[in-house]
Structures are given as C-alpha cells and as structure tokens.
Amino acid sequence: MSKRETDEITGVETTGHEWDGIKELDNPLPRWWLWVFYASVAFALVYWVLMPAWPGINGYTKGIRGHSDRAQVAQQLETLREVRGEGAARLTNATLQEIEADPALQQYAMAVGQSVFGDNCATCHGVGGGGAKGYPNLLDDIWLWDGSLDGIHHTLQVGIRSGEPGARFSQMPAFGRDQLLTSAQINDLTDLVLVMSGQDGDRAAADRARPIYAEQCVSCHGVTGLGDPAQGAPNLTDAEWLYGDSREEIRTQIWAGRNGVMPAWAGRFDDETLKALAVYVHANAGGR
Amino acid sequence: MTVVIDRTKPPEGDPAPKGPKSAAARARGQGDAGGGLYKPRAQIYPKLVQGRWRNIKWLLLVLTLAVYYITPWIRWDRPGDLPDQAVLVDFAGRRFYFFFIQLWPQEVYFITGLLVIAALALFLTSALFGRLWCGYACPQTVWTDLYIYIERMFEGDRNARMKLDAAPMSVNKAWRKGGKHATWLAVAFGTGGAWIFYFHDAPSLLRGFWIGQAPMTAYVSCAILTFTTYILAGTMREQVCIYMCPWPRIQGAMLDQHSLQVTYRFDRGEPRGPHKKGATWEGRGDCIDCNACVVVCPMGIDIRNGSQLECINCGLCVDACDEIMVKIDKPKGLIAYDTDSAVAARACGETPTYKLVRPRTLYYAGALALVGGLTLWGLSTRSPIDVHVLRDRNPTFVRMQDGDVRNGYTLKIANRTFEPMTAQVAFSGVTGVQIKTPGVEITQGPATLVVEPNQVRTVRVFVTAPREALPQANMPATFTVKAAGATQAVETTFLSGAANAR
C-alpha cells in the first residue's frame, strides 16, 4: 500500500512508491509540456471539425473542408496532363519522320520515350534495351521484324503474337516435339545451322541436312539462311541469336520452337506516347 | 505522471522551499549565487557617446547597410533571357551571378574558396587588430547599433530609459514602447525584405511580393528574417555574442600579447579612485572611477577588468574615457587600442614595441595569399565548357550484324558562355570509328552539336568500331570536345568483349 509523504530534502511530495528504500518524487509536469499537450488537444478538436477524422458505419466524417487525398491526386494528374498538353499536341500533329528531324521535338520525344520504356519495356528488353535471352536486343541493327521507324511504331501498336487483330505473327514449328522430324534429322539440321553461321559444325552432317532444310526451313529463313524481316524470320548466318548460339541451344530451338510474345500497346498508350516510344527505340537502335 | 528523481540538494542553511519546485526553478533561483545553470539577464542601457570611434561606427553602419540594401538593385546587362541582376543567387535556374562572374552548382568550390578566404582574413585581422569584425562589421553589431539608435529616439538616453523601465505603465510609456517596437519590426521587415531580393529578380519580386504572387519561399524567408532580426537585435543583443556565437571562443586562439585590442592601460590608471577638482594627482592613477566606460558599453562589461570574452572591441569606451580625460585635463588614451605587451612594457618602465610581423600573422597571411591566389587562378582559368561522359552500362556494348561493335555514351556538354556554342565532338583511341548521335547524320570525323547559351546539352553518342580495330576487350579511349576556343578531353573506355569474340 502506498503512502504519500513529503520528502524532507526537496520538499516535494513522493508518489509513495518505494523500491529498496528509494522513493519517487512527485514533481509536477514541466509547464511547457503541459502547454504542448493542451495545444495538441485543442488542435485535435479543430482538426476533427475541419478534416476527415472519425470512421463511421457507412463511411466517415468528411470534415467541413471537404478534403480528399484521392480528389487531390486526380486534380494533380489533371494539372499534369494540362502541363504536358502542349508537348503532347506537338507529338500528335507531327509525323514520326518530322519528330526525328526536329531536334527540339526529338529531344522531347526521347525524354518521354525513355521514361515510358523504363516503366514498361525494360522488364523484358532491359533498362538500356540490350535485351536478354528470348527478348531481342533493341540496340543493334538486327531486326526480326521491320526495324524502320514506321515498322517499330507498327510493332509497338499491334505487338508480336499478341493475339490482337493484325498482330505480327510468325511461328517456328516444334519439329522434334511435334514429331515432324526425327531426332537424327534435327541433329543434322543443327550442324547445318552451325555451319551457315560460320561456327564449328560437322560438314558431313550439314550436307545430309540440306534437303531437309530445303523442304522445311527455306520458306521462312531463305535459301542462304538470311531470314526475312517481312515474316519475322531470323537471319541464321549472323552472330545474333535470340535463344543462344551453342549447339545445345540451337538444337533445342529446332526441337521445341519457342515463340516469344510481345504485347500490343495501342490500347494502353495514347498516340503521342507510342510515337515517342518509337522515336526513342529507333534513335537508340543501330541503323535501319 | 512524469517522475524526476531529484538528487540536487539546496545550499546549506537554505530552508527547504515550500511546495513543489522544479530543478530548473531551483537552479534559476541560485543563479545569482553562481551555483545554478541559469543566469538571469541584466538589462543593459548603453549611453550615447561622441568621438572618433563612434563616428567610424556610424560611418560603417551606413556603409554596410547601404551595401546590403542596394546590392540587389544593381543592374548588369546580360544577353537574352538571362537575368540582368548584378548579384543573384538563382536557385530556380541553378546559377550564381556576381557581376561578370557566373557560377554553376558544380563550381561550388569557388564558394568554398571564398569562405576559406573570409575565415583566414578574419584570423589575420584578429591576430593583428583584434576583433574589428565583431566591433564594426558583424551584422549582429550593426543591427543592434541601429536598434539602440531607434530605442534612443523613442525612449531617450540611458538614464531616461532606465527611468522609463522602472516607471509604471502610462500613456507616455505605452506610446514610447509601442513606437519603438513598431519601428523595430518595420526595420526587421525591411531586413528580411531586402534579403529575398538576392534570390529573385528584385523589381519583379517587389511587385509580386505585394500582390501575393511571389514564391512561398520569399514570404517564408522574409518572415523568418523579420523574426530573427527583431529578436536578435531587439531583445537578445549581447547575449547572441556571449552565448550563441562561437567566434568569441575561437578567437582566443588567434590573439596573442601583440594583438591590438581595446585595452585599459592599468599602468597609467591604477590605483584608481574618485578625484576632487584641485586635489593632487600624486601617488594615484589617472582613472577617476567615473564609470563612463562602463555605462556606454553595449556588452555591459567593465573593460578595466582586462580583455574578456564579452568584449567586441567596438571602442565606445575609448571615446567615453577620452571625453572624461579632456575634462579633467589629462592626456587622452587611458583606454585605447593597444596591446597587452605594450601595457606590460610600460608598467616595467620600458618602451613598448609593436610587432605586426609575427609567426602567426605570417602563417595567416601566407595561407590567405595561397587560398586567395588559388581561387583567383581558378576563376581566371575557368573553362567555358564542361564535359562529362557517362558510359552505357546496360548493355556495355552491342555487336552489330556485320560484327562491328557499338558502344553508347551519354555526353553532357555544358555551355557556360552566354552565346550559342558549336561543339566538335571527336573520339580517339579506336581507329575507323563512326560517330552517330540521334538526329545527326553518321560521321567519320567529329560530330557537330549546337549547345544553347548557359545550358547543358545531354546527347547520346553511339560509337561504332570495326571488328578489326578492336584487339582487346577494353580499349582506352578519349572524347575531345572543342568549343568556344576551349578544348576538353575526357577519358573513357571502349568495351567490345573482343577477348571473348569468336
């Protein structure tokens, strides 16, 4: 049981609590602290009236200022759209070629494009556009599909194997999995592809595969293996390999025929953003 | 409840106070005895004084205030849309303009140089002549002086002010006090108001300020400076120097016995005591203990106690004492700018010597010359261009269809001049390269770019090198940018993965 008493030395009342002979003084709260506390209470009362504060069963007290973070964000987005309106209008009204020819407009488009690319494209194509296995490198001068400014713009709009109407579409058959060719034939074809691209391959096996190539591959990849950007068929003679250049990886691609997908962006971005993105990708690409 | 376990004991013989009392309150109560943490401030009523140093102080007050208020209004013609204000700290545009000098944020080392020069100049001045800065040029001193002048206008000189403060509230006291504070606030507002002109175009800001269209920072800065000026110069005064300013503590390291300071020549003054007219001067000093030096002191100290931390070396006591010395027909200079060593020499009957050249003054002067020279040299050889090269990191290189290798770089070319600039960007280190920048035709030689005045142009530069030109995976390379009569070479590398190439 606690007993309040006055401490002789300081003249301050104790709380009556005692631990091993040590007693606690009951000093008053510092006045500044009390004032801050009262001020906080007063502030809270005013705040409840002015701002959204108390949760209810259906919603919450709105406060007489009618403040809403959501509405504020919407307002800010609207303001942002207005700020960007001028630049966006210039992009809308110019053709892709005009944008590229006008340094100021191009710089604007590049800035828009870079930001959009980072948010949407970098996931697959890499931050710098360098691509990854199965995702094309956008910086070199090798294009599976049309690498011109208009071609890039079109690819962005419709996508590749995206399922959208008019999408760019090509299909590498799964020759092994679907039992179109035998395992031995695929081995020979692999050697042929290696030889065509200037790598070490078994020449005898390659020769054995030539008739098969002529029958199965020529329609897309061409007689000499140069590919066909009109159909999205890769060049088999260069050093660029979407799924890897090793014997194992080439064989896997003939066997299983992987076909990557790029989404169509026409519905997701407005016209000026798509244009800016096309200009950005084209400017960073090596030619074409 | 907050609980404070209090182990402080009251001084012996002091009866225990009645009722609860906080530790702070107790310490405050003991302040006068010197045992507590708090020392109550004694109001200082500096008396007006006439004389040489007071006149110099008035002159410097007008001069420094004039510099402060007029500087932002000086115009300086710069081409195009660039600001026409001679001295402007343009935060929005990220530039600092000072007449013909214009600095970019990257060149903040010039500001560092300036600050080091200022510090060393202060060191040197202190070592030679004591705290001249404190006594004459420090804003705290200048504004306090101005505020005391205003106070005197409304409330009269020392005695009148003391009487007024002791008197009960009356209409007379109310209007005098009210007028003083209103004028103080007006001056404070003028101080804060002038400050913001250094950061925006002064004429347009002046207009915008009154119609509520100035930036929020202008209003906030003005309010803060109004408040601090009013508080620091109006109510805190000498406490700023004694408790807030670090300089009085640092300057002890700069001063020695040869530094000039306001000095009471005790060899001549002591023993002091009141003197009746016609009485003999035999066996006593010249100090008649009239306290004239004490009542004029804005710091509220007695200079006869020797040099002390609180003394700002303003020399007002020199003037006050000289006035008295003339009246009692004694030579001036009982209190004067003098050195400790001179006073000590005179006390021993020797001829005082004054040494301006001492190791410490040499060090300070040498360091000052060095830093000042470096800063000047840096300013005079400042390049009109600044080039930075950022290599693409992802991917580090791109192999083209024909086996060529392409590296991407981002160049930032700063045009620090006020004219449009044509920059020639050349690449060396790898032979046979092609340079391409978006929007510019592919070239074999240097690429030509136009950089707008006072701007940085960020440009992507693609360098494509033939496979044969790449014997190693990592080739040292150099971008050389020529523009506005200046050349800057920036080293970088050309990566090709050649070591791994087939």
Image: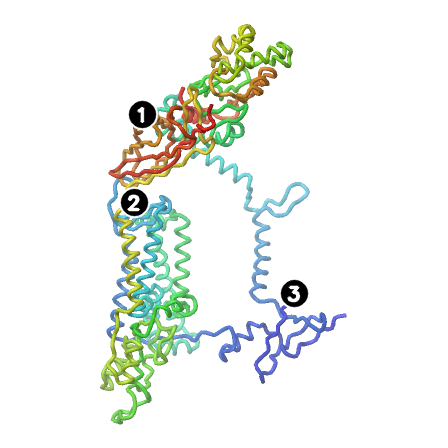
Q: Does residue B66 lie above or below B12 as drawn?
A: above
Quadrant position of residue B484: top left
> Given the image, what chain letter belongs to the residue carrying mark 1?
B
Residue hosting label 3: B1
Indicate the amino acid at tag 3: Met
Where is residue A263? Give x, y as percent.
54, 22
Q: How is the image coloured?
A: rainbow
Residue hosting label 1: B444
Q: Residues within 10 Å of mark 2 (few under 14, many from 20)?
A: some
Q: Which of the two discs, 2 and 1, sits closer to the camera?
A: 1
- Is the C-beta separation of discs 2 and 1 under 8 Å? no
Apparent side of residue B250 relative to residue A252 in the rendered image (left or right): left
Q: CA distance from mark 2 to mark 1?
A: 40 Å
Q: CA distance from mark 3 to mark 2?
A: 60 Å
Indicate the amino acid at tag 2: Pro
Where is residue A266? Give x, y as percent.
51, 22
Q: Residue at x 58, y 67 (%)?
A: A30
